[in-house]
Image: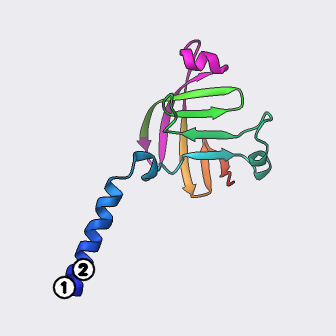
Amino acid sequence: MDKTLMRIRYFTLILSMLALLPPSAQAREAFEGVWARTDKECRDEDGPNSRVVIDLNSKGGPLAERYEWHCKILKRAPVEQATRVHLRCHEFWEEYTKNQNGELRSETWSVRSPTRMLIDGKPFVRCIR
């Protein structure tokens, strides 16, 4: 078998395997992950701080979670070089799971690099574990 045919078969096999991967293993949005205003706040997982966890594959639906705020992502729309996000936020997890007493909010998320983004114009760094 000539080398060109072997390369085509190999390439086809790789593409087929990638297509079978579950969505969670495929490409993620650039803003997904854990973000905070400072590296110090990245290390503080429990205290009141600016940490934001953005998870589009959460069991309860797309989620943006902060200290004492649990926000369901209702809608995302591109705007210029950013994403406008509409949220329903709840102070308590029980209210979030029951979808009660939510407050509607919207934010603009603008990823500047793999490790930096702006949330409503405020700089955030990606928390790397």
Q: Residue at x 42, y 52 (%)?
A: 26
Q: Residue at x 80, y 35 (%)?
A: 47
Q: Quadrant of the C terminus?
A: bottom right
Q: Residue at x 33, y 52 (%)?
A: 20
Image coordinates of residue 61 in percent, x first then y, are 48, 30
Task: Answer with the quarter of the image where residue 100 lies.
Answer: top right
Q: What is the span of residues highlighted in magenta in the rendered image?
A: 78-106
Vertical arrangement, residue 96 with respect to residue 48, above or below: above
Q: Check disc 2 and give the amino acid type.
A: Met
Q: Which residue lies under the disc numbered 1?
A: 1
Instruction: Pick whichever of labels 1 and 2 is earlier in the sequence.
Output: 1
Q: Is residue 92 left or right of residue 4?
A: right
Vertical arrangement, residue 129 with respect to residue 4, above or below: above
| Magenta residue check for 84 | yes
Q: Which residue lies under the disc numbered 2?
A: 6
Q: Secondary structure at mark 1?
A: loop
CB within 8 Å, label 1 to label 2:
yes
Q: Residue at x 67, y 33 (%)?
A: 66
Q: Quadrant of the N terminus?
A: bottom left
Vertical arrangement, residue 66 with respect to residue 22, above or below: above
Image coordinates of residue 105 in percent, x first then y, are 56, 26
Observer-nearest residue: 110 or 88? 88
Q: Check disc 1 and give the amino acid type.
A: Met
Q: CA distance from mark 1 to mark 2?
A: 7 Å
